[in-house]
Image (cartoon, rainbow, N blue to C red):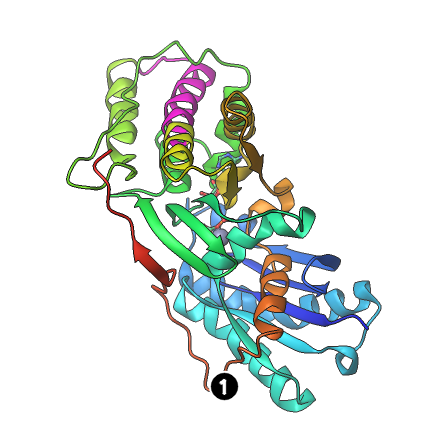
């Protein structure tokens, strides 16, 4: 008998619901994006996000169930993102999941959004083996992690300032491109010359944090360049910025895998949809006989399949949340050990 879990994700600007069977069979994956609403403001407006979630959540849940060919009574559990994210947005998902759990007498499972992202590649590759090095690159996070089991992590490195996706979005903004900038920069970069504009691309942090990232210097370099040369071809600017950002991400991921002596790298989060990052990491890893796993683009950006999928592993361990589950805006990954190295 299959185990059907309904997943709900409302941490930022996507209202998403999905039904996943046994942790990897995606029966439905429904996403209502708010990009149109936030685009005119150049970024996510939290108050507008919550209002849209409120309108979209019930239709998304109904759609996810009907596409899966199931009704509420056939669900084994309901899972929901409880952080990190925008507090008002998270609360809409939590209230919905809590109500379903209570009325249908099924367990409630609270999921950390970052664990959801890290789990996304497993939906299509259930055979991924640990230990592995994971790189989460999203709008709010840039984290390099050593993973020994589905829920055992060691933090190797993180951003000191902007997240990778945030850097893409901010650079796009200074270039006059609409939000979210990542996919547009990716597209423009494909037609530009990545060597056209020299940009800083390598930051070494001493003091035992060799895997940390910093993107604000790169962003500032783009701003200064555009001030000096306002007629720069946007394609060349996008290509040069993208290559600088990607090369740092790839170098750190490979270096971390070698340091931990693992042959598996997992790439996750919205920026994992970036074609240059996917290609470059695959190339560099294959040259060292390492294997890279990343999700299909639709599973890189925020979705509820990753939430329902990861929830299965909590379900089989009976790790359930109580009905007073609350939103935690700055929820972090529960790391087991802190990395320390001077390499
Ligand atoms: O994971 P996600 O959907 O939301 C967060 O949890 O933050 O990630 C969204 C981020 C945005 O910054 C967006 O610009 C970036 O992912 N992104 C991309 C691409 N697609 C989305 N960045 C670079 N290249 C892409 N193709
Ligand atoms: Zn996300």
Q: Quadrant of the N terminus?
A: bottom right
Residue closer to the observer: 324 or 281: 281
Answer with left or right where residue 301 lies relative to residue 40. Answer: right
Residue at the image position 34 percent from the left and 31 percent from the top:
174
Q: Quadrant of residue 252?
A: top left
The magenta stretch spans which residues?
Answer: 230-249
User: Residue 175: where, in percent of width, then height?
Assistant: 38, 27
User: Residue 168: where, in percent of width, then height?
Assistant: 41, 35
User: Residue 287: where, in percent of width, then height?
Assistant: 52, 20
Q: Secondary structure at mark 1?
A: loop
Q: Quadrant of residue 199?
A: top left
* Res 12 seen here: no
Residue at the image position 40 percent from the left and 62 percent from the top:
84
Q: Quadrant of residue 208?
A: top left
Tell me the chief SS of the magenta region. Answer: helix
Dot 1 corresponds to which residue? Answer: 322
Q: In the figure, 60 relative to 244: above or below?
A: below
Q: In the figure, 42 relative to 281: above or below?
A: below
């Amino acid at each position: 008998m299959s185990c059907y879990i309904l997943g709900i994700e409302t941490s930022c600007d996507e209202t998403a619901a999905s039904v996943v069977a046994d942790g990897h069979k995606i029966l439905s994956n429904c996403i209502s994006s708010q990009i149109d609403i936030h685009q005119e403001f150049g970024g996510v407006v939290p108050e507008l996000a919550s209002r849209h979630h409120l309108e979209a959540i019930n239709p998304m849940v109904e759609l996810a169930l009907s596409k899966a060919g199931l009704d509420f009574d056939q669900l084994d559990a309901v899972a929901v993102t409880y952080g990190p994210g925008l507090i008002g947005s998270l609360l809409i998902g939590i209230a919905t999941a809590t109500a379903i759990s209570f009325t249908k007498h099924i367990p409630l499972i609270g999921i950390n959004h970052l664990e959801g992202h890290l789990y996304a590649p497993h939906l299509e590759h259930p055979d991924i083996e640990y230990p592995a090095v994971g790189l989460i690159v999203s709008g709010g996070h840039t984290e390099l992690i050593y993973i020994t089991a589905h829920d055992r992590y060691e933090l190797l490195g993180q951003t000191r300032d902007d997240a990778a996706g945030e850097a893409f979005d901010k650079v796009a903004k200074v270039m006059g491109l609409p939000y979210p900038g990542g996919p547009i920069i990716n597209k423009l970069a494909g037609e530009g010359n990545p060597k056209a504009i020299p940009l800083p691309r390598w930051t070494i942090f001493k003091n035992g944090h060799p895997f940390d990232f910093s993107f604000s210097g790169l962003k500032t370099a783009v701003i200064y360049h555009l001030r000096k040369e306002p007629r720069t071809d946007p394609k060349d600017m996008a290509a040069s910025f993208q290559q600088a950002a990607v090369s740092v991400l790839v170098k750190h991921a490979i270096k971390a895998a070698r340091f931990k002596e693992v042959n598996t790298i997992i790439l996750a989060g919205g920026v994992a949809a970036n074609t240059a990052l996917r290609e470059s990491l695959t190339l560099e890893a294959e040259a060292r006989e390492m294997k890279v796993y990343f999700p299909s683009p639709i599973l890189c950006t925020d979705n509820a399949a990753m939430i329902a999928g990861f929830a299965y592993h909590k379900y089989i361990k009976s790790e359930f949340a109580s009905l007073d589950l609350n939103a935690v805006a700055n929820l972090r990954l529960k790391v087991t050990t802190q990395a320390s190295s001077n390499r």
